[in-house]
Amino acid sequence: MANVEHSGRPAEAFGATAVGGVKGRLRAARLGLWLIAAVLAVRQVAVVLSTPRGERLTDLETWVGPNGVLHVKGSLYDSTQFTGTPFAGLVLKPLTRAAEQALGWGWTFGTLLLVVALGLVAARALPQPVSRRTSLLAAPVAVSLLMLSLPVRNALWLGQISILPVLLVLVGCFIVRGERTSGLLIGIAAALQPTVLLFAPLLWFTGRRRAAVSAAVTAAACTALAWAAMPHDSYAYWVHHMAGTGLGGPADDLANQSLHGGLLRLGLTGPLEIALFFGLGTAVAVLGVRRAVHYARDGQLLLAVAITGCAAIAVSPTTWQHQLLWVLLAVVGRVGKRASDRYVWPVAVVLVMTLPAKMILPNMSAVYTLRDDIVLLAALLAATAVPFLSRTSPYYRSPIPTEYAAPVPARLKHVPLLPFLRRVLTRPNLLLELLLIRVTYAAYQKVRLAATGGSNSAGRVRAEHHGRQILDIESFLHIDVEHWVNHAVVKVDWLRGFYDFYYESFHFVVPLTVLAVLYWRRPVDYRWARSSLGFATLLALVGFWLYPLAPPRLLPGLGIIDTVHGVQDFSKPDYGTLTALTNQYAAMPSLHFGWALWCGVVIAVIAPRWWMKALGLLHPFFTVSAIVATGNHWVLDAVGGAAVVGAGFGLSYLFQGPRARSAMATAASKEPAPEKEPSPS
């Protein structure tokens, strides 16, 4: 399976100046990416080494003796924290006399070097031929993604050797030349992570039978050696714990992303669960190896390795977070005929492997099962279902191109500032849009809460001080109408109920509806509107961070009645189910009004009828009335919301130029009208 092609395609001749400019930009981009990778590496090392003893390298610290030196007492598995095989313990035995502090530094930096080596090998193993740009940029991108991935972060944190089996397999498949040496490395990897033995059938059916036999013999010899040296530990692992089950936590723990863990979380137990696990595991292993053999023969050797690794994840009795690195390698597979669809699979894989599941799927009971097993599902899909393109497919190298609007002159001389961000005319991939919207909103929630130190109480004093500042400004401008409006509405039950309902319900429903209609009926305008909304929300987050502000209902002494949650006890405020989850002091600017104004502007610009435009503009009017009447915002908050929305539309225009529909209309107006054919006499 060794990859003998490593050179990219020669650059075409464009002239010395053009070629020199391209090379210079590539060198600058490569240097920038390596700098990002270095920053990520330093950050990960700093996080681990700055963590107090007892909270880092916990798997290794189970061996710490009374004199601050690693010392094994009794079984490796007495504490159940060590999840490696007995052979892994045998490999670590020489370290038991190392000083704890020196081992911590050495282990962390050693793991870091393994990650860098893994990124370099993975970049070298990309299916050939690749462009010069890809060959130059692949290595720093691969290292950066590895540094960000949850498996690497967990391995660094816990002091695990889960990166080593992946590296051994890649080196055995892509670096070494001799079949026996290749099998030897893969066999050692299987001794460290037993289900890696699935690579033996892959080697066998791709014609490398000596490597397959060597891998199986090496794995068996290493396991036998560990059994002879540590019979008690070997019995505990292979018999008592059934190849690791129960080590590191209960088998149904959310961190166990194997089929066994998934079935247990579904409530299945006993003989039925065991039978299903063995049946499904066998099917996944067989189908995964068959698919891997197909893609290996197709020349996509790295994808074949990733598919086999994903199958190994599923069929293992326990697969903890630090053992899930195989899924990230599946990012190299190409899916989709359209160029715009090519980003869906890699983006989904990167998000699943770098973000907590709660950021990817909402906190709803209906999706708990999907959210709890999201990495397992990604592994299963990669191993058995995702239709990766074959290199013989006409779409592998030449997907259906994306349609762009013809560029038109803008009123400002240097607009667009980023001409490569051209206006796209086709509808974006729905799955990718939903995924990015969800992740963006989850990040928005986290940043909004972090703006006050992670809790409402942390920023209360500063927020109340800012609240009094806003009240003073409004008093000077004679627009401090919050108290009067609030108490006037409270006296009318039906009006209070209307504004409470409007405040709680329409904030998300209307923007999502507008986006959905634009996506389905006006895909050209959808991208323009979505970009403007994204810029506005990003600017609002900056406002939340720099200027935490208490809304009128949370400013003591003002006498505002919280019509939604009732009168507040400021020592123990109650904002409903989101009391501890949202930043109640993120009032400036008001995104309630900002998003409503965005909806009104988009409808007013795009709607074909005047009454539709007027109806769209009613939404921001009702919203600003609701946020003031319910005591949730100051009048100036609405002004801030309008400012960020205006800036959002402005940035979209500045970076990308006029919206695509305007560009199309301008281009169409310049085309000569077709001549009429003479009518037959």
Image (tube, rainbow, N blue to C red):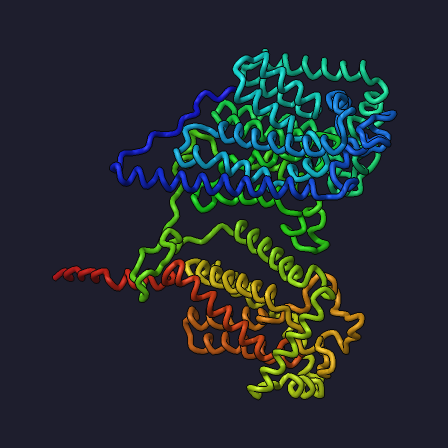
Q: Is residue 427 rendered to the left or right of residue 226?
A: left
Q: Position of residue 263 (x, y in %)?
A: 75, 38
For the residue pair 14 and 27, the one nearer the viewer reads as 27
Q: Is residue 32 rendered to the left or right of residue 22?
A: right
Residue 565: quarter of image: bottom right
Above or below: residue 148 compared with residue 182: below
Q: Residue at x 80, y 23 (%)?
A: 238
Above or below: residue 431 compared with residue 128: below
Above or below: residue 650 compared with residue 321: below
Res. 662 in view: yes
Q: Position of residue 404 (x, y in %)?
A: 36, 52
Q: Is residue 156 rendered to the left or right of residue 667?
A: right
Q: Position of residue 613 (x, y in %)?
A: 45, 75
Q: Is residue 672 rendered to the left or right of residue 510?
A: left
For the residue pair 63 and 438, the one nearer the viewer reads as 63
Q: Position of residue 279 (x, y in %)?
A: 72, 29
Q: Residue at x 37, y 57 (%)?
A: 417
Q: Residue at x 57, y 20 (%)?
A: 172
